[in-house]
Amino acid sequence: MSHTVENTGIYKGSEFNRFGLISLVILVIGCLGGIAVGLGAIESILSLSLILIPTMLTLSLLLSVSPMKWIINSASVCVVIDVIMIVFYSIY
């Protein structure tokens, strides 16, 4: 008895391309987080933790070889938060 779950939409083929996506996620998450912290998030504990917690969660999911659906969702949230903080600190 075999039961497989088909991934559709953005998740289609993500398990097959796991290693390429992992390297891309590490690069994007690391660079955006570093830029956000460098632009001014280091001065506030609240903004630093707002960037740090999703970034570390995403990296922990990568390290624990979690399902790609979890990793993609976590990375998407992290990118949105990082971009919002980058825009905020670029204007402010």
Image (cartoon, rainbow, N blue to C red):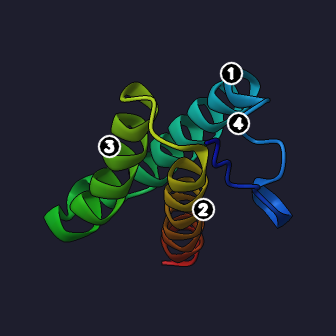
What amino acid is at disc 4? Glu
Judged from this view, the residue extending furthest toward the left is 45
- Residue 48 figure quarter: bottom left
Find residue 66 and report its horizontal and vertical position in percent: 45, 39
Q: Which mark is residue 19?
A: 1
User: Residue at 53% across / 48% down in the picture?
Assistant: 71
Choose the circle earlier in sequence order: 2 or 3. Answer: 3
What amino acid is at disc 3? Met
Q: Are marks 2 and 3 in contact (CB under 8 Å)?
A: no
Assign a secondary structure to mark 2: helix
Assign a secondary structure to mark 4: loop
Q: CA distance from mark 2 to mark 1?
A: 17 Å
Assign a secondary structure to mark 3: helix
Up/down of 90 relative to 38, above or below: below
Find residue 80 and report its horizontal and vertical position in percent: 58, 69
What amino acid is at disc 2? Ser
Choose the circle earlier in sequence order: 2 or 4. Answer: 4
Q: Which residue is mark 2?
A: 76
- Residue 25 figure quarter: top right
Q: Viewer-proximal residue, 37 or 66? A: 66
Find residue 64 and report its horizontal and vertical position in percent: 36, 29
Nearer to us: label 4 or label 1: 4
Q: Residues within 10 Å of mark 2 (few under 14, many from 20)?
A: some
Q: Which residue is mark 4?
A: 15
Q: CA distance from mark 4 to mark 1?
A: 9 Å
User: Residue at 32% across / 43% down in the picture?
Assistant: 56
What amino acid is at disc 1? Phe
